Amino acid sequence: AQKVTQAQTEISVVEKEDVTLDCVYETRDTTYYLFWYKQPPSGELVFLIRRNSFDEQNEISGRYSWNFQKSTSSFNFTITASQVVDSAVYFCALSGGETSGSRLTFGEGTQLTVNP
Amino acid sequence: GAVVSQHPSWVICKSGTSVKIECRSLDFQATTMFWYRQFPKQSLMLMATSNEGSKATYEQGVEKDKFLINHASLTLSTLTVTSAHPEDSSFYICSARRLLNSPLHFGNGTRLTVT
């Protein structure tokens, strides 16, 4: 079975601080995809990144960066110099192949609040 | 980029009535659409997987007679909540993908309130 764990339920930081959101996953699939989505108060899900299991290169996109460590089954997300507009719930998700039928499994989400 | 449109954005209905939610992929053909449910301050839970032209596959614990899903074309899937009750009040989100393991694109969600 697939499982995604986001141990941090809520995080509160002050603007301009860096913040890292943790994500740990479990899967029996050898081929899988990892995702991060942002859900602002309005409710829609905003796609941030997709990473496949064979690509362990870290990625940076502006103030966002992702650290994929297969050895520890983690896919952590860092926001550098956080801004108030970053306040949202962030979901890590996993989509597998062989055993999971490509279903997307979400973590419980981390509520990030960036205070001015 | 790919766009998924979900309608309505919010709906209030009386207990016992039925509500239909539409999910459309606007600029691509979606072989598969997924319906999720999200309670306040909780994660998204997959309700069912909808494949065009075939019956939906429901997750364990989801009543197929209560949550009717129809995927009649490659660009439209509908979720009908039949005989709605207050406990059905939730945020329903659809998502669609072109191909197996293509990125999922989500609609903006529908907030259902049953009074």
Image (spheres, coloured by chain):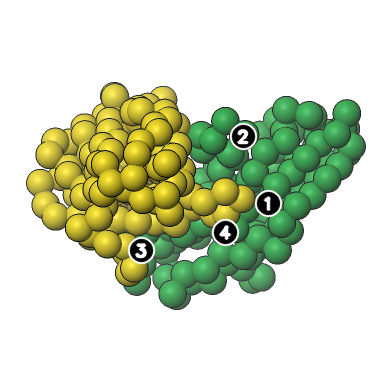
In the picture, the quarter occupied by the N terminus of chain B is top left
Q: Give the percent coordinates (x, y) of residue B51.
A: 19, 49
| Above or below: residue B18 compared with residue B48 | above
- Residue underneath mark 1: A110
State whether discs 1 and 2 lie on one chain.
yes
**For the residue marked with disc 1, what is the amino acid?**
Thr
> Which numbered disc, 4 or 3, marks the residue that appears first in the sequence?
3
Which chain is indicated by disc 1?
Answer: A
- Residue underneath mark 2: A40
In the picture, the quarter occupied by the C terminus of chain B is top left
- At x 59%, y 40%, the residue is A38
> Which numbered disc, 1 or 2, marks the residue that appears first in the sequence?
2
- Residue underneath mark 4: A107
For the residues bearing labels 4 and 3, Cβ distance under 8 angstroms: no
Q: Quadrant of residue B76?
A: top left
Q: Which chain is yellow?
A: B
- Residue underneath mark 3: A97
Q: Which chain is green?
A: A
- At x 20%, y 58%, the residue is B65
Q: Which one is closest to the eye, mark 3 or mark 2?
A: 2
Q: CA distance from mark 4 to mark 2?
A: 16 Å
